């Protein structure tokens, strides 16, 4: 569905909104990724953590789509001191199954020390790698993207952030309460918007308010997802529950 989309009264002329049945979610996302890999077999792709992309990862494992390089969207502060972190999550869900070794993974820096310099170097590494071809993103119930919480500027860069209570709780749930992160490092909204293509993945009824705010509300830092409308090419893959 291209052009102005009736379901969402927003300016979407260069963008695509695909509303899919739950069983089509992973297939639709992998089809998009494969279309990118046809043009650029070793594309640099950003894969997020969270529950939303799980159907994408199940389908990637099924189809053994694995030629790409991967960059990380975010991770918890001092992730190397943890086994409960985004890197291990990605290894478990997708990287190991697709035999994507560390030589093909750009890990976001989180080590204590000179993090601003390490974050600037991460941005340089992304540029040296040719820039991100495709960034998959989940949507926070509060409109966050990665760990860009409400208040994040459109031109924010990779940086250390403090998590909101709600985001910390949601992340603690991922680890059955074994770890509750308070700080993290995330690609900034400005970093994300430099990608050649952005794909926002949205599943579930609890995301409907955030999705409407992202696509129909004003573009503003209180809903960082609203800035995605400025992406060079944006695809939104949402399941029907989000329309409730
Ligand atoms: P979820 O989280 O995919 O687990 O719903 C998304 C997010 O909060 O960014």
Image (spheres, grey):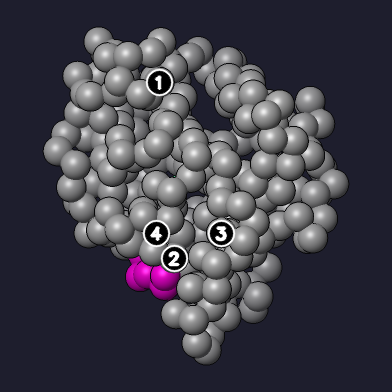
Q: Which residues are magenta?
A: 159-163
- Precedes in sequence: disc 2 or disc 4: 2
Q: CA distance from mark 3 to mark 2?
A: 13 Å
Task: Tell me the residue that label 2 is attached to.
Answer: 158
Report the front residue among 30 and 14. 14
- Precedes in sequence: disc 3 or disc 2: 3
The residue at the point 25 percent across, 10 percent down is 6
Q: CA distance from mark 3 to mark 1?
A: 26 Å
The residue at the point 46 percent across, 59 percent down is 187
Quadrant where the image shows the N terminus: top left
* Residue 203 drawn at (x, y percent): 45, 29
Mark identifier at residue 188 = 4
Q: Is residue 237 above or below residue 96?
A: above
Q: Residues within 10 Å of mark 3 (few under 14, many from 20)?
A: few
For the residue labelled by badge 2, is the local secondary structure a helix, a strand or a loop?
A: loop
The reply to whether callout 2 and callout 4 are in contact (CB within 8 Å) is yes
For the residue labelled by badge 3, is the local secondary structure a helix, a strand or a loop?
A: helix
- Precedes in sequence: disc 4 or disc 3: 3
Decide if residue 103 is on the left or right side of residue 241. right
Q: Nearer the viewer, mark 3 or mark 1?
A: 3
The residue at the point 61 percent across, 52 percent down is 130
Q: Image quarter for residue 159? A: bottom left
Task: Tell me the residue that label 3 is attached to.
Answer: 127
**Is residue 162 a member of the stretch shown in magenta?**
yes
Q: Residues within 10 Å of mark 1 (few under 14, many from 20)?
A: some
The residue at the point 62 percent across, 44 percent down is 45
The yes-or-no answer for disc 1 within 8 Å of ligand 1 is no
Q: Residues within 10 Å of mark 4 (few under 14, many from 20)?
A: many
Furthest residue toward right = 99
For the residue labelled by badge 4, is the local secondary structure a helix, a strand or a loop?
A: loop
- Precedes in sequence: disc 1 or disc 4: 1
Task: Tell me the residue that label 1 is attached to.
Answer: 16
């Amino acid at each position: 569905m291209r052009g102005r989309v009736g379901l969402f009264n927003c300016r979407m002329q260069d963008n695509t909104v695909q509303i899919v049945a739950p069983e089509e979610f992973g297939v639709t996302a992998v089809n998009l990724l494969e279309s990118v890999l046809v043009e650029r077999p070793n594309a640099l792709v950003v894969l997020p953590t969270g529950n939303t992309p799980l159907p994408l990862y199940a389908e990637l494992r099924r189809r053994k789509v694995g030629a790409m390089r991967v960059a990380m969207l975010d991770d918890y502060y001092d992730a190397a001191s943890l086994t409960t972190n985004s890197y291990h999550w990605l290894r478990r869900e997708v990287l190991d199954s697709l035999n994507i070794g560390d030589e093909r993974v750009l890990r976001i820096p989180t080590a204590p020390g000179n993090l601003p310099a390490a974050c600037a170097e991460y941005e340089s590494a992304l540029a040296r790698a040719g820039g991100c071809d495709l960034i998959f993103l989940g949507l926070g119930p509060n409109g966050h993207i990665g760990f860009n919480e409400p208040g994040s500027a459109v031109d924010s860069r990779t940086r250390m952030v403090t998590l909101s209570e709600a985001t910390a709780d949601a992340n603690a749930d991922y680890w059955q309460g074994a770890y509750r992160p308070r700080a993290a490092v995330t690609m900034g909204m400005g970093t994300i918007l430099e990608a050649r293509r952005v794909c926002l993945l949205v599943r579930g009824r609890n995301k409907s308010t955030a999705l409407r705010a992202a696509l129909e509300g004003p573009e503003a830092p209180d809903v960082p997802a609203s800035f995605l409308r400025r992406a060079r090419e944006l695809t939104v893959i949402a399941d029907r529950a989000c329309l409730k």
